[in-house]
C-alpha cells in the first residue's frame, strides 16, 4: 500500500518517525517506513532506534550522495506502489496526516500536502527563513490550485505513485541546494500527470538561521543560473520570475551595470536580510544582482 520515505542529514528524526508509525499502525494498512541517512555525522545513535519499530527500516549511507540521489535510492528501496516523501525536519500537525494520503493510494497521481510554519515562532535569528516561508511557501491548497496545479511542487511533503516516479526520477547531476524540485515538477507537468493539492501540511521545524539561509539562497541562485546556461532546460524561464527578469536585463545589456551595483550595495542588502525585519522585495533584488555578478564573472 504505502512506503513512507524519509531522507535524513544531521537531524534527529525520532519524533517524526514515531508519529508517522503510530498513525500508520492505527490505519491498519500495509506500510513501511524507510529512513536513510545521507552521510550524516550527527544523531546517528538516536536515529537508529527507529529501526527497531515494526515495519521500519533504517539505512546509513557512508557518504553524502545529495538531495536528488538519496531520494532515488529511497524509491528504489521501497516495496509498495505509493511513495510518501517527507523531509526529515518536518513535524506532523494532524492526527489524520497519514490517513488523508491513503485515500489517494488507489490511483496513479501526485499529491502535494503543503508546508506550514509555527505561528508562535518569532525568533529574530530565523526571521528571513520564517518570512520567506510564510510569504512564499505556506499556501492553502485552494491558492496553490489557483496558481496552477503544476506549481508549488516541493519535495518537502508529497505522495507519488511508484509508476509515475520511475518515469521521472530526480536529476542527480544537481548538487547542493536548490531546483531539483523545479525540474521534477516540470517533468510531472510534461507527463500530464494528475496532480492534487490538499491541505495536509507538515510544520517546517529545521530552520536555518539568517546567514545560513542567505547562503543557501545564493547557492540556489547559482544553481538556477548554471542550469539555464546549459541550454537543456528552456522551460525554466517560464517557471522562474528571477530568471525571466535576468534574461530581460541581459537582452538590454544591463548585466555589467547590475553586477557593479551588486558590488556596491550587497553589504547594505545583506544587513537588511539578516536583520529582524527582512524585505522580500530586497531579497528579490539581491538574487537578481547576485545572478548578474555570476554571469559577468563567467
Image (cartoon, grey):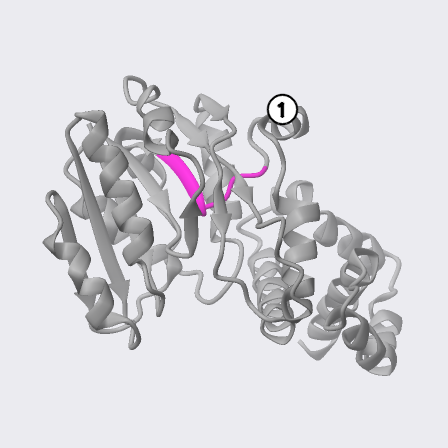
Observer-nearest of 196 and 298:
196
Residue 186 vs residue 1, the one in the foreground: 1
**Residue drawn 44% across the image and 46% down it:** 155
Secondary structure under tag 1 reads helix
Residue 80 to residue 192: above or below: below
Q: Quadrant of residue 253?
A: bottom right
> Is residue 156 shown in magenta?
yes
In the image, the segment drawn in magenta is 152-159
Point out residue 156 in the picture as x, y percentages from the top left corner.
45, 47
Give the residue at x 37% y 46%. Answer: 86
User: Which residue reaches farthest front?
Assistant: 120
How far across and how far down the image is residue 110, in percent?
41, 29
User: Relative to residue 114, is residue 28 depicted above or below?
Assistant: above
User: Can you tell which quarter of the image residue 100 is in?
Assistant: top left
Task: Specify whether 213 is left or right of 154.
Answer: right
Q: Dominant secondary structure of the magenta stretch?
A: loop
Instruction: Tell me residue 135's x, y (percent).
Output: 71, 47
* Residue 85 in view (yes/no): yes
Residue at numbered disc 1: 142
Whole-percent x, y for residue 30 in the image: 15, 29
Between residues 287 and 42, which one lies in front from this camera angle?
42
The quadrant in which the C terminus is found is bottom right
Quarter of the figure with the N terminus: top left
Magenta stretch holds residue 172: no
Horizontal placement of 50 versus 224: left or right? Answer: left
**Classed neighbour count for the residue bearing mark 1: other residues with Cα under 10 Å, few (<14), some (14–19), many (≥20):** few
Is residue 71 shown to the viewer in this render? no
Amino acid at each position: 500500500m504505502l512506503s513512507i520515505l524519509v531522507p535524513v542529514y544531521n537531524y534527529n528524526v525520532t519524533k517524526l518517525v514515531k508519529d508517522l508509525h503510530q498513525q500508520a499502525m492505527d490505519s491498519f494498512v500495509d506500510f513501511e517506513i524507510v529512513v536513510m541517512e545521507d552521510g550524516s555525522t550527527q544523531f546517528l545513535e538516536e536515529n537508529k532506534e527507529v529501526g527497531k519499530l515494526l515495519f521500519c527500516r533504517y539505512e546509513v549511507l557512508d557518504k553524502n550522495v545529495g538531495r536528488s540521489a538519496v531520494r532515488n535510492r529511497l524509491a528504489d528501496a521501497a516495496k509498495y506502489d505509493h511513495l510518501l516523501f517527507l523531509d526529515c525536519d518536518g513535524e506532523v500537525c494532524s492526527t489524520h496526516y497519514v490517513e488523508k494520503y491513503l485515500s489517494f493510494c488507489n490511483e496513479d497521481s501526485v499529491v502535494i500536502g503543503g508546508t506550514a510554519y509555527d505561528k508562535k515562532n518569532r525568533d529574530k535569528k530565523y526571521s528571513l527563513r520564517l518570512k520567506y516561508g510564510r510569504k512564499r511557501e505556506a499556501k492553502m491548497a485552494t491558492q496553490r490550485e489557483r496558481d496552477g496545479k503544476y506549481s508549488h511542487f516541493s519535495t518537502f511533503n508529497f505522495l507519488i505513485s511508484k509508476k509515475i516516479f520511475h518515469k521521472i526520477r530526480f536529476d542527480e547531476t544537481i548538487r547542493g541546494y536548490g531546483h531539483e524540485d523545479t525540474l521534477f515538477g516540470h517533468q510531472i507537468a510534461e507527463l500530464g500527470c494528475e496532480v492534487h493539492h490538499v491541505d495536509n501540511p507538515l510544520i517546517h521545524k529545521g530552520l536555518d538561521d539568517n546567514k545560513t539561509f542567505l547562503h543557501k539562497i545564493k547557492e540556489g541562485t547559482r544553481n538556477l543560473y548554471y542550469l539555464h546556461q546549459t541550454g537543456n532546460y528552456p522551460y525554466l524561464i517560464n517557471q522562474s520570475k528571477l530568471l525571466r527578469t535576468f534574461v530581460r536585463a541581459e537582452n538590454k545589456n544591463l548585466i555589467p551595470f547590475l553586477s557593479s551595483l551588486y558590488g556596491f550595495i550587497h553589504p547594505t542588502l545583506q544587513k537588511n536580510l539578516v536583520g529582524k525585519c527582512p524585505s522580500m522585495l530586497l531579497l528579490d533584488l539581491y538574487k537578481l544582482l547576485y545572478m548578474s555578478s555570476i554571469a559577468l564573472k563567467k
